[in-house]
Amino acid sequence: MRKLKKHLKRVLFVILSIFLSLHIIPYMLPLPIDSGKLFPPFDESRYMVIDGIKLHHRSWFPESLHSSSKFVLLVHGMGGSTFSWRKQVLSLEQAGHIVVSVDLPGFGYSDRARGFKHSQANRAELLWTFLDQFSQEHNFEIVPKWTLIGHSMGAGVITEMALQQPDHTDSLVFVGPAVSILESRFTDLLRYPPAGRWFAVLMRYVFINQLSVQALLGSAYGRIPAPEETTGYLMPFLWPGTEHAFLDIATTSTQTEVSDLENLNKTCIPVLAIWGEKDSWVPADNADDLGKLIQNLTLIKLPDAHHCPMETAEERFNDLILNWLE
């Protein structure tokens, strides 16, 4: 009996030690905090503060406008930024279109402030406020109707934007759209403070590095990324506070409901979906399901392209976009 009691005490001691370690160790590892200091990463970088959120954006204007000029908003996907659209800007600008690219909160060079609810509805509302202020700043003679282009997660954002303000939406372009992502029970675990802290610590010390970003890009590209491509995606992740922002994103993001996609039919807004046939992140098989939900859908699959066709098949991709705008 004494041996059994001794053994139980040892087991309890080990369990207690593990429990305390898991709850204490992550708080002993320092994490950088966003200082709120802004700097322009690109020549055309600008910031706009909306409800206390600093949004980084870039814009390009053609030398002259014509009757077929469009207002185009580019919205990146998970882990992306305005950098993701670098190969589209010149062709759109030269074709006479006004182009705006923006970093969503927590991504790119936008705010890392805690507390923002990253639901698609909140993101959409924020972007419409941004576009309204942007239009006022540039004194457009007309109220713009925007062509909204969204990659992966960004497709869900522009879906909600179109539903919120269909009268200000000219058309939608989905690129490898992640619009049917199921919620994970993992997010409930992250709401427990020590688990959330471990998430942030692992991001900073394990996942935010060149090798990890290179591996993720390789999977999304379907090829080995060039050093400048890896650097372009890595640099925003090094921004202090990224880990905390991604914890908020992981615990407050919402999925795009089937009903949201079906409600697009009521708006009569035309939708173009561009899919890489070899996309392993959002398999092209999903395209057929999307076609059943959205009546006014034009679907194009790019052979040999993966999850980021705007970067790896840019010539074919840009031709599709320009033809769509015309």
Image (spheres, helix red, strand yellow):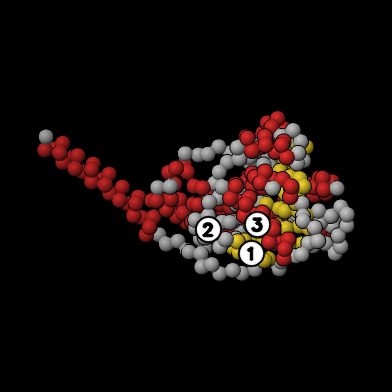
Residue at (43% x, 50% y) in the render: 196
- Secondary structure beneath dot 1 equals strand
Question: Which marked residue is nearer to the observer: mark 1 or mark 2?
Answer: 1
| Residue type at tag 3 | Thr
Tell me what residue is drawn at x 73 percent, y 58 percent: 100
User: Between disc 1 and disc 2, whose residue precedes?
Assistant: 1
Lower position in the chain sequence, tag 1 or tag 3: 1
Q: What amino acid is found at the position of numbered circle 2 in the picture? A: Thr
Q: Earlier in the sequence, mark 2 or mark 3?
A: 3
Please tell me whether residue 269 is drawn above or below residue 63 in the rendered image: above
Numbered circle sitting on residue 48? 1
Disc number lying in front (1 or 3): 3
- How far separated are the C-alphas under marks 1 and 2? 19 Å
Q: Picture quarter containing residue 108?
A: bottom right
Residue at the farthest left position: 2
- What percent of the width, then of the height, locates residue 315? 80, 49
Q: Which residue is mark 3?
A: 129
Provide the residue designation for mark 2: 242
In the rendered view of the protein, which quadrant contains the N terminus? top left
Crowding at mark 2 (Cα within 10 Å: few <14, some 14-19, many 20+): many
What amino acid is labelled 1 in the image?
Answer: Met
Residue 269 horizontal/vertical position (percent):
75, 41
Instruction: Give the distance between the C-alpha atoms of the residues marked 1 and 3, in whole angstroms.
Output: 10 Å
Frontmost residue, 160 versus 185: 160
Q: Are marks 1 and 3 in contact (CB under 8 Å)?
A: no
